[in-house]
Amino acid sequence: LHLLSRRQRQMCIETDLRHSYAVAALRSGDDIKTVQENLGHHTAAFTLDTYAHVTEKMRQESAHRMDSFIEGIQAAKKA
C-alpha cells in the first residue's frame, strides 16, 4: 500500500478545491474568461478543454429550459 506524503496529500486537496471552484463558478453562470483568469490558466481554451464536462451539462440544461419555455408558449396559444 503506497501512502501519500503530506505534501502530496496537500497537493491533492488543492487540486480538488480548484476543481470544485471551477465547476461551481461555471454552473453558477460565471463566464469562462473570468474562471480562466481566477484559476491562472494561460488561455480560456485550456479551461474549456479541462471543464468541458461541466459546460456540456450546462448546454443540456439550457436546452431543457428552452424546450420548457417553448412548450409554455405553445400551451398559452392554445388556451
Image (cartoon, rainbow, N blue to C red):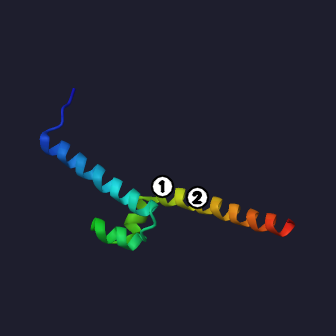
Indicate which label's residue lies in the foreground, 1 or 2. 2
Q: Residue drawn at (69%, 65%), measured in percent from left and top?
A: 69
Three-letter code for the amino acid on which mark 2 is drawn: Glu
Q: Position of residue 55 (x, y in %)?
A: 49, 61
Q: Is residue 68 depicted above or below 43 in this figure?
A: above
- Alpha carbons under labels 1 and 2: distance apart: 13 Å
- Callouts 1 and 2 close, C-beta under 8 Å: no
Q: Is residue 34 depicted above or below 55 in this figure?
A: below
In the shown orientation, is residue 52 left or right of residue 35?
right
Q: Residues within 10 Å of mark 2 (few under 14, many from 20)?
A: few
In the shown orientation, is residue 30 left or right of residue 9?
right
Instruction: Find residue 61 and name its label.
Output: 2
Front one among 43 and 20: 20
Instruction: Find residue 11 and name its label.
Output: none
What residue did someone put label 1 on?
53
Going by the picture, which residue comes out furthest to the right?
78
User: Helix, strand, or loop for circle 2?
Assistant: helix
